[in-house]
Image (cartoon, rainbow, N blue to C red):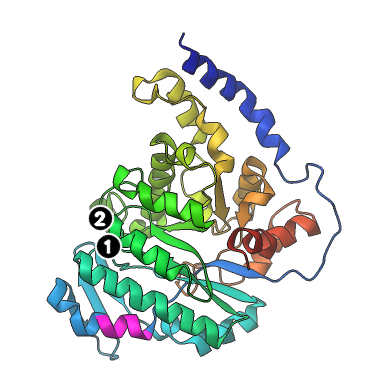
C-alpha cells in the first residue's frame, strides 16, 4: 500500500472523532443570548440598473428579451429563463419583509441568469453594473443590506480584474459563484486564479445552482429545482474536493446552498468509493474529513434533517439562509431555526447571525 493511501485510510479512521469535536453540544457555552443580529446570507436581488442594461443590450449579446402581460422584463437564453419581479428589485418590499420576520440583515446576491452566458466584454459590463448597484443600495441602507460580488467567470482574467475592483466597494462582503460555469465544473484550472485572489483578500465564496445537471429529464413536477439544484450543489462541492481546490487553498471559505444539497448525504458513499476506486487514488485524505471544509445554509425545509447536518458538520459551519424571495424560500427563518431539535441558545445565535458575521466580516 502506498504512503498516500495509508494516510488516506488513517484519515478515514480519524474522521469520526474529528467531526465529533466540532459538533453541536461539544463543550460550547450554554445559555448565552447576547444581542446578535439576525443575518440572512442567502437572499437574492436583481438591481434595476442590471435589468435595464439587460433590456437595452441583452438581445445584441445573444439573449431574447421581452416583457410579459404585467409589464415585467423577461429574459431567455438556452437553459435560463427569468422574469424580473418587483419583489426581487424593490428594497422597500424587501425591508418590509425583513421587518415582519425579524431579520436584521440581507446579504444580497445575483441569481439566474447570472452573467456567464454573455460574451466576456458584456459579462464584465453586467457584473460591474450589478456590483456598483449593490454598493449603492448598501450605502442607502448601510445597516440592513450588504452585497456579494458577481464575476464574469467565463473569462477568469476579467473575473480577477473585477474582483480586485469590486472588493473595494462599500458593503461588499464576499463573492458569489454558480455551481458551474456554462457546463465547466468548479475545479477547472482556469478558475484557480479567482480562488487564489479570494483567499488572499479573505473573501468567502458562496455558491448557488443555475441550469442544473440533468435539467432535460426534470422538466415535470418542478424537479429541476426540487432535485436538480441540490444535485448540482453536490457536484460543485465534490469537484472542489476531488479536484484539489480545497487543498490548494486551505484558507478559502466556501458556503454551500440548500444545506449542502446531496454533498453531506452522500459523503459516506464518496468516502468508501475513494478508498477502492482508481479514479480517486490521488486523494490523501478521506472525503469525510472535508465536511468541515465547507459551510452550509439552513435551507433544508426539514428541522430534523437540519439537526442531523449540524451534528455531522458542527454548528460553527452553519449559516442562516432563506433564498428570499423565491417561492422555495424559508419564509419564517427564525422560527425554522427555533424548530431544529436540541439547539442551545448559544448554538441558535451562531446560526442566526454569529457565523455569518464572522465569515462575512459584518
User: Does residue 256 show up?
Assistant: no
Please, is residue 312 above or below residue 254 in the view? above
Please state the extent of the stretch shown in magenta in the rendering.
48-53
Q: Which quadrant is the C terminus positioned in?
A: bottom right
Q: Nearer the viewer, residue 269 or 193?
A: 193
Which residue is identified by label 2? Answer: 182
| Label disc, if present, on residue 34 of the rendered structure | none
Query: Image check: 60 left or right of 299?
Result: left
Q: Residues within 10 Å of mark 1 (few under 14, many from 20)?
A: many
Q: Residues within 10 Å of mark 2 (few under 14, many from 20)?
A: some
Label 2, label 1: how many angstroms apart (C-alpha)? 7 Å
Q: Position of residue 113 (x, y in %)?
A: 30, 68
Q: Residue at x 15, y 78 (%)?
A: 59
User: Does residue 203 show up?
Assistant: yes
Q: Position of residue 253 (x, y in %)?
A: 53, 51
Q: Nearer the viewer, residue 328 or 116?
A: 116
| Label disc, if present, on residue 116 of the rendered structure | 1
What kind of element bears circle 2? Answer: loop
Q: Position of residue 125 (x, y in %)?
A: 27, 74
Q: Quadrant of residue 129?
A: bottom left
Q: Main secondary structure of the magenta part?
A: helix
Please, is residue 330 above or below residue 291 in the view? below
* Marks 2,1: beta carbons within 8 A: yes
Q: Quadrant of residue 187?
A: top left
What kind of element bears circle 1? Answer: loop
Amino acid at each position: 500500500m502506498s504512503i498516500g493511501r495509508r494516510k488516506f485510510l488513517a484519515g478515514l479512521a480519524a474522521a469520526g472523532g474529528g467531526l465529533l469535536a466540532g459538533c453541536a453540544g461539544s463543550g460550547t457555552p450554554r445559555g448565552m443570548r447576547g444581542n446578535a443580529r439576525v443575518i440572512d446570507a442567502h437572499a437574492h436581488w436583481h438591481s434595476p440598473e442590471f435589468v435595464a442594461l439587460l433590456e437595452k443590450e441583452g438581445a445584441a449579446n445573444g439573449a431574447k428579451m421581452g416583457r410579459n402581460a404585467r409589464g415585467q422584463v423577461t429574459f431567455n437564453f438556452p437553459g435560463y429563463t427569468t422574469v424580473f419581479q418587483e419583489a426581487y428589485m424593490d428594497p422597500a418590499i424587501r425591508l418590509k419583509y425583513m421587518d415582519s420576520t425579524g431579520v436584521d440583515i440581507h446579504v444580497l446576491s445575483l441569481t439566474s441568469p447570472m452573467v456567464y452566458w454573455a460574451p466576456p466584454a458584456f459579462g464584465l459590463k453586467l457584473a460591474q453594473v450589478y456590483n456598483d448597484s449593490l454598493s449603492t443600495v448598501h450605502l442607502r441602507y448601510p445597516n440592513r443590506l450588504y452585497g456579494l460580488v458577481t464575476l464574469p467567470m467565463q473569462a477568469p482574467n476579467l473575473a480577477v480584474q473585477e474582483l480586485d475592483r469590486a472588493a473595494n466597494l462599500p458593503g461588499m462582503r464576499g463573492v458569489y459563484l454558480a455551481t458551474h460555469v456554462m457546463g465547466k465544473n468548479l475545479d477547472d484550472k482556469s478558475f484557480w486564479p479567482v480562488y487564489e485572489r479570494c483567499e488572499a483578500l479573505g473573501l468567502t465564496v458562496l455558491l448557488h445552482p443555475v441550469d442544473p445537471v440533468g435539467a432535460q429529464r426534470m422538466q415535470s413536477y418542478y424537479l429541476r429545482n426540487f432535485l436538480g439544484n441540490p444535485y448540482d450543489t453536490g457536484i460543485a462541492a465534490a469537484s472542489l474536493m476531488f479536484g484539489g481546490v480545497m487543498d490548494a487553498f486551505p484558507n478559502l471559505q466556501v458556503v454551500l446552498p440548500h444545506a449542502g444539497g446531496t454533498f453531506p448525504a452522500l459523503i459516506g458513499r464518496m468516502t468508501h468509493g475513494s478508498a477502492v476506486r482508481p479514479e480517486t487514488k490521488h486523494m490523501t485524505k478521506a472525503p469525510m474529513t472535508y465536511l468541515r471544509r465547507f459551510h452550509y445554509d439552513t435551507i433544508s425545509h426539514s428541522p430534523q434533517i437540519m439537526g442531523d447536518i449540524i451534528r455531522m458538520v458542527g454548528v460553527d459551519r452553519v449559516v442562516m439562509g432563506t433564498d428570499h424571495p423565491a417561492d422555495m424560500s424559508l419564509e419564517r427563518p427564525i422560527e425554522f431555526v427555533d424548530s431544529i431539535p436540541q439547539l442551545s441558545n448559544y448554538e441558535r445565535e451562531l446560526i442566526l447571525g454569529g457565523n455569518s458575521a464572522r465569515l462575512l466580516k459584518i
